[in-house]
Amino acid sequence: MIPAPFDYVAPKTLEEALKMVDRHGDEAKILAGGHSLLPLMKLRLAQPRYIIDIGRLHGMSYIREENGHIAIGALTTHAEIESSSLLRAKCPLLSETAATIGDVQVRNRGTFGGSLAHADPTADYPAAALALNVEILAASTAGTRTIAVNDFFVDMLTTALRPGEILTQVRVSPLAALTGTAYEKLHQPASGFAIVGVAARVTLGSGGKIEDVGVGVTGLGPKAFRAVGVEKALRGKKASEQIFADAAHFAAQGIEPLSDLHASADYRREMAAVYTRRALRRAFARAQGKA
Amino acid sequence: MPEANRYLGKPLKRKEDPRLIQGLAHYVDDLVLPGLHHAAILRSPYAHAQIRSIDVSKAQSAPGVVLVLTGADIRDSIGVVPCAAQIPDMKAAPRPVLAHDRVRFVGEGVAVVVAADRYAARDAIDLIEVDYQPLTPVVDPEKAIEKSSPVLYEGYKDNIAYRWQLEGGNLKAAFKNADKVIKQRMVNQRLIPVAMETRGVVAEYKPGERQLTVWSSTQIPHLLRTQLAAMLDQPEHSVRVITPEVGGGFGSKLNVYAEEALVGFLAMRLGKPVKWIETRRENFQNTIHGRDQIQDVEVAFKRDGTILGLRVHALADLGAYYQLLTPLIPTLTGLMASGCYKIPAIGVEIIGVLTNKMSTDAYRGAGRPEATYMIERVLDLVAAELKKDPADVRRKNFPKLADFPYATPTGVIYDSANYPRSLDLALKNSGYKKLRQEQVKARKQGRCVGIGLSTYVEICAMGPSSAMPAGGWESSTVRVEPSGMVNLMTGASPHGQGQETSFAQLGAEILGIEPADVNVIHGDTAIVPYGIGTFGSRGTAVGGTAAYMSLMKLRGKLATLAGFLLDVDPAKLVFSKMKIFVKSQPSKSIGFGEVVAAAYSAKKLPPGMEPGLDATSFFEPGNFTFPFGAHVCVVEIDKETGDVRLMKYVAVDDCGNVLNPLLVDGQVHGGIVQSFGQAMLEEAVYDEQGQLITGELMDYAIPRAADLPWMETDRTVTPSPVNPLGVKGVGEAGTIGATPALANAVADALSPYGVRHVDMPFKRERIWKLMQASSRRAK
């Protein structure tokens, strides 16, 4: 429970932080809330030479509306996302998802940006981020670029962030009219992470047709993904219990689910369908103004 | 018992809590001594390997490191870890403090580093190079006893530690006369105790005084002192053990551990105080585990539900080495195999098996949960087979009230009980009839609802010395100080049970003073008279009785003195509200403080009376006690996921007289939660290589508050005749009574799926697969 030796630096500005990240490259790890990194370090599974603590940077923790979208600073904690009245009103899926993470202590310390950048395959936010089509801003000494969430998760613990980049902001659109969202999670009883987590967004058009749908799935494979098969089976169709159940079967299509102590691949696959159906059903009810 | 109770039996809030809640309590790790050094231990990554060589040179020259020692360095200086249990024809399996030739489980200590700070010590253990020759690990106890299995100990022909047998009544006749016989295999899985505070040791040696002081998070300070003195070859009066606050034990600290001797040795060797604090991973790998039995059960019964005979064959996985009571624990399963039923013939065979795992030992309940689980599942299997209500089958087999004290075929004598009364109350409190009706409705709606029942008896208040490895009595010294304040020293070693409160209530009641005036001292061998410790639900029943005896002695002396001062017959005096007075004539009264002052000023004492107010007592119980109760619960299973939700829990427990109902409720609540853990979540899993893959809290699930519904507790009171307080003990009741209730509920829920029995833990996937298999069969 004692990490290997490391040097600790706490930059005061983002520019300073970016320079440090640039200089130390692979030998450095960025510390935000520390709720994924520190446990790994204490077990000596991660032994970075440098810890660049961005937790003290000012102006990176916020949730605000600008230019028609909601901007969320990378250092915003899960607790802040959970309780944000802006998000609850205009994009409740993130608040709902945040509320399922860990416990109160974890939610008070862990950060939105840190969780996304860590890309734990069983983390909760990636499912919601995918379902919501968020955009991710990455800064480096060369400037800032925008990454579409569909391109962001690359593999287990690997994202599209390049060496020298820091995730600074996430942008999400307020939900369109007649849209409902839901996150359904089968939690691993020890860690609280997702064995399967499904985030669904359903937008209804005229006559009860499904105009748009986004389904993000976490916990199943090496990285969170969009259940494209499910989305395809629903888009343009008239919403019904049956169609949700049928579509949900595509949740694990093309995925070789993880198998571990807590759930076999078969069970994960089956639960992906169950939880997808549940998430769709609840998102649909909300789109109709129920529940 | 003295007359009207002012404090005894009342729900006083715990005296311990303010300091615990405010973070003002002191645990081992809070102790900082001048010049303190820190130890870190290198542990084996192999379950089974020969140590070819160890190179410590790099570690030795690492910054801050003052000492590095291997098993070979200390083997002649420190004795092996003691085992107090003896079973006839048992193979020896002593654990060296550090392994020196062979390692036998993952996590076994191999070398130790002492450094000026904890970080330097931890860093340096990575620099030790060990050349291991891996051997085939022996992990599965059923394979371990096969002839082809590799053996853990050179020179042994197999891994069978012992065969323990017990038979009472005419088994042959029972099975011959039976209408039916059912067989069932049951696995009582291995558990990890997970005390919130891991273990920790600080030791300081003063060469001038030749005094070694060891602070350890333990349940048995005196037994530890005796054993440490022996392991370190020191005279016992040169060793002092202090237990600061202990953050949970559950039996996992009812032991003598390698590190306790090792840290003491290091402090002596270096002449500097040394601290070792166990990490959570070490705690998982290297502090005792619990349970781990595979039972094959056979029950013979009549069509009317009468049980005639029971055969139990159990494999008990002992792990690689014996800790203090390792071999003994499974035999308690045998002793309690009868449950709260009159079964004329019982045969038990237990095979203790050595495997490449951490030792099993006493974990809350210690052998009895395994018995209760087995017999309570058996009762439900019989009920299911006969299509009778499980409550009726239980009632059919209860001994009659006139049968008490009831001698079981397993050779124990149940002190007192009223099983029908606790069952009736549990059925009433739960609305059992209505629950069954609702279950029928729920099933019609396609819901999967189960109702579970358990009626249990446990063996507590350990125990008569004849049956205990190191004595079963308990001690106390009570001193009324000159100001009238009382110091009550108990040989028991409470670590969460709340006896600082309940013994203060006892003292206040007997002496007619206030609980705040009674200070309970425990856990320091230099202050407290020799005691056995706190385990086996004995703290109050045995330790409390010893306290009671000393208090009564003092009361007698105070009465004699007060009678002398008031010129009345001492027999007519009562003690209440800080006064001692004649019951029929309250004006004939003297203040408690005045009498105490007279005893110390010693100017006017009755002829022959010694000055001072000090009494010591040792209580030797004549028998164990046998608390009992009935639990009812309701579960609902999510058919799509296999997730089991506990919807309702009703407990009725009878632990005899109650000193403080809040403490009893707390014990019952905690026990039920731990039972829930075993039933639903917990399992220590070793892979085929002997790696503990549930090696941390990220993978080993323990219950959380949100997992459980409100628990409805109630009591019946059947005083125990074994001690003058009439108390039975309640520390383990919850873990003994609740697990089978939960298991029976799950089996009941799954019965429409053709499931007769399912092993714990009831993880979602396991349940889901059973339901899937059943639907496939139906198709």
Image (spheres, coloured by chain):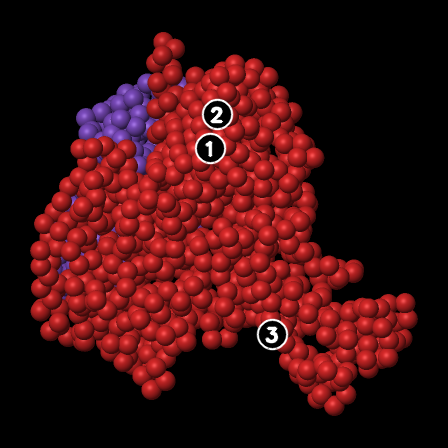
Chain colours: A purple, B red
Q: Residue at x 51, y 55 (%)?
A: B465
In this view, A8 is above or below B330: below
**Is B420 or A284 nearer to us in this picture?**
B420
The residue that mark 3 highlights is B487
Q: Quadrant of the N terminus of chain B?
A: bottom right
Most extreme residue toward the bottom is B603
Q: Residue at x 79, y 78 (%)?
A: B562
For label 1, count other residues whose C-alpha is less than 10 Å away and answer few (under 14), some (14-19) or many (20+): some
Query: Which of the chains bears the disc numbered 1?
Result: B
Instruction: Identify the disc placed on residue B171.
Output: 2
Under mark 3, the amino acid is: Asn
The residue that mark 1 highlights is B167
Secondary structure beneath dot 1 equals strand
Secondary structure beneath dot 3 equals strand
Nearer the N terminus, badge 3 or badge 1? 1
Asked if labels 2 and 3 share a chain, the reply is yes
Nearer the N terminus, badge 2 or badge 3? 2
Q: Separation of disc 3 and disc 1 at Cα?
A: 48 Å
